[in-house]
Image (cartoon, rainbow, N blue to C red):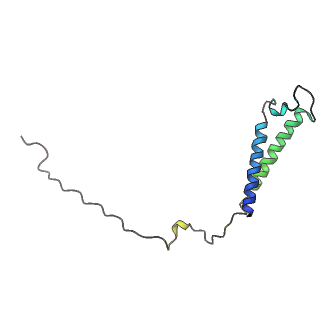
Amino acid sequence: MSTFTIFLALIIVVAFLLIVVIMVQNPKGGGLSSSFGGGGTQQLGGVKKTTDFLDKSTWTLATILLALILLSNVAVNRSSGSLESKALEADETIEQPLPTPAAPAATNDTTTGSEE
């Protein structure tokens, strides 16, 4: 398995975790994070601590995702040799002459309509 494939798998996992963490949050403070334990009972750490954890984990996952994307650029296989496009290879180009436009048909200017 190549290094790029490992980076790609890690990027997908981190992106999925980031989506889950963002979906759990509620900007008003009443989302899924406040319903752990339910009934207004004090949880381990409380609701405020849960939202702090979700906020910090969002920033951490976003930073990890950005770093993985930038580091995956190093792992891209660049063994092609040349920087030119393969579509513009000189050996494979075939020059074809352009078709010549057909001459316009000659019109007779003396007969322009009906004769009376």
Q: Residue at x 78, y 33 (%)?
A: 27
Q: Residue at x 79, y 50 (%)?
A: 63
Q: Is residue 71 visible?
A: no
Quarter placement of the N terminus: bottom right
Closer-to-camera residue (74/3): 3
Q: Position of residue 62 (x, y in %)?
A: 77, 47
Left or right, 98 with reference to 72: left
Q: Residue at x 12, y 48 (%)?
A: 111
Closer-to-camera residue (95/104): 95
Q: Position of residue 4 (x, y in %)?
A: 72, 61
| Residue 33 higher or lower than 3, as above or below | above
| Residue 60 higher or lower than 39, as above or below | below
Q: Residue furthest left?
A: 116
Closer-to-camera residue (10/79): 10
| Residue 107 higher or lower than 99, as above or below | above
| Residue 30 higher or lower than 84, as above or below | above
Q: Picture quarter containing residue 68?
A: bottom right
Q: Position of residue 78 (x, y in %)?
A: 67, 67
Left or right, 112 with reference to 18: left
Q: Picture quarter containing residue 20?
A: top right
Q: Residue furthest front?
A: 1
Left or right, 83 with reference to 93: right
